[in-house]
Image (cartoon, rainbow, N blue to C red):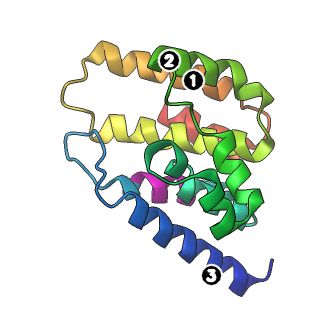
Amino acid sequence: MKENEAIILLMKAAHFAAMKHTDQRRKGERGEPYFNHLSDVAQILAEHTGGTDPILVAGGLLHDTIEDTDTTYDELAAEFGAEIANLVREVTDDKSLPKAERKRLQIENAPKKSDRAKMLKIADKTSNLKSILHSPPADWTEERKQEYFAWAAQVVEGCRGVNKSLEKVFDDAH
């Protein structure tokens, strides 16, 4: 992909994600715009892959659109192509399942993911840990925070081996 095409793709993905998540806020005590999380995930991916994979970075911006908005796989595929839509689908939880089951499946399925999906998972969990440290949900006890950190570590354990730099940034946050 040419540099100008990559820039256009990334700005299109950023705009699409910002519009789709307009009314969403983070659970943290500061109630940050949800887009802050998406841009953080994309920035982590860009930095720790040397900016060499615009498909992955766009996936970072879009990774929660199917799961958390009215966006469909077909809509993503039409806007961004099957490669990005497949990556987003690969990291999307089935919201029809109970939360505990979704969390269990993330741990179980992490080792089976593509390398891009594993990197995206590591960046997503890193961003979530940073959010819990800097702006935790007001109703979360210390025990709940520790449980989230332990669960995130289990998910990331199944993703290891694809990018040492991403693994280190997760470990530092953890």
Would you say residue 42 sits in the magenta stretch?
Answer: yes
Q: Amino acid at mark 1?
A: Ala
Q: Nearer the viewer, mark 3 or mark 2?
A: 3
| Quarter-of-image position of residue 6 | bottom right
Tell me residue 83's x, y (percent).
77, 58
Q: What residue is drawn where x is 50% and y is 17%? A: 150
How packed is label 1: few (under 14 Cα within 10 Å), some, or many (20 or more)?
some
Tell me residue 94's x, y (percent).
56, 30
Is the N terminus in the top left, top right, bottom left or bottom right quadrant? bottom right
Q: Which residues are magenta?
A: 37-43
What is the count of numbered marks? Answer: 3
Q: Amino acid at mark 3?
A: Ile
Identify whether 88 is placed above or below 162. below
Q: Is residue 44 visible?
A: no
Q: Which residue is denoted by mark 2 in the rendering? A: 150
Q: Amino acid at mark 2?
A: Ala
Q: What residue is drawn where x is 68% and y is 55%? A: 85
Q: Secondary structure at mark 1?
A: helix
Mark 1 to mark 3: distance in Å? Answer: 34 Å
Identify whether 148 is placed above or below 91. above
Tell me residue 61's x, y (percent).
54, 59
Would you say residue 8 sits in the magenta stretch?
Answer: no
Dots 1 and 3: beta carbons under 8 Å?
A: no
Q: Which residue is denoted by mark 3 in the rendering? A: 8
Mark 3 to mark 2: distance in Å? Answer: 38 Å
Question: Main structural element of the magenta stretch: helix, strand or loop?
Answer: helix
Q: What residue is drawn where x is 36% and y is 41%? A: 131
Q: What residue is drawn where x is 73% and y is 65%? A: 81
Q: Secondary structure at mark 3?
A: helix
Task: Point out which mark residue 153 bears.
Answer: 1
How packed is label 2: few (under 14 Cα within 10 Å), some, or many (20 or more)?
few
Dots 2 and 1: beta carbons under 8 Å?
A: yes
